[in-house]
Amino acid sequence: MQIYKQILITMDCSPVDDAIIEHVSALALQNNSIVSLIHIIHSHTIEQDRALHKDAKIFLNEKCKLLQSKGIETHIILKSGEPEEEIVSVINNGEFDLVAMATHGHGFFGDTLFGSVSRVLKHKTTVPLLIIGPQAK
């Protein structure tokens, strides 16, 4: 039985993504899932957007190829805007069975100060969330 047909992984484009990629690749193989990697560029200038877009594309392509080398159909979604809003929009307009993400492990004060995409997703979507801490492997 295929539980997770389509999995969305929110990507930070940092080393914390490795933990979630490892977990989701196992789930995707077990379920013959399609995986989408999403990264939202949050920039303040056109130049910053271009630079971040270029770096994110390189990072996402590397992770996409890694998953594809394991036999997992993988797609990239790269957008600019407010991360929480864009991710919720993609989730609500897609057919995802699971949203997976790694956290930075800021803790309560960091989440309060910096905001937390996972907290927003928990309240604004009904799709199950898989949240892995950066130390999990």
Image (cartoon, rainbow, N blue to C red):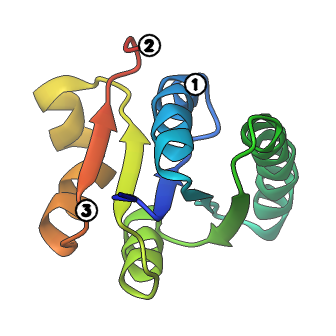
Mark 2 or mark 1: whose residue is earlier in sequence: 1
Q: Nearer the viewer, residue 40 or 43?
A: 40
Q: Nearer the viewer, residue 19 or 71?
A: 71
Q: Is residue 37 above or below residue 58?
A: below
Kindly identify which residue carries mark 3. 121
Disc sitting over residue 18 in the figure:
1
Type of amino acid at the residue the image marks with label 3: Leu
Q: Quadrant of the C terminus?
A: top left
Which percent across, then down, holds residue 74?
71, 56
Q: Nearer the viewer, residue 6 or 110?
A: 6
Report how far apart the C-alphas of labels 1 and 3 lie in the structure. 21 Å
Q: Is residue 7 visible?
A: yes
Mark 3 burial class by Cα count in 10 Å: few <14, some 14-19, many 20+: some
Residue at 65% x, 71% y: name it: 79
Q: Is residue 116 visible?
A: no
Determine the image quadrant of residue 99.
bottom left
Type of amino acid at the residue the image marks with label 2: Lys
Report how far apart the C-alphas of labels 2 and 1 lie in the structure. 8 Å
Which percent across, then down, holds residue 38?
59, 59
Kindly identify which residue carries mark 2. 137
Residue 19 is left or right of residue 77, and the answer is left
Report how far apart the C-alphas of labels 3 and 2 lie in the structure. 23 Å
Residue at 14% x, 29% y: name it: 109
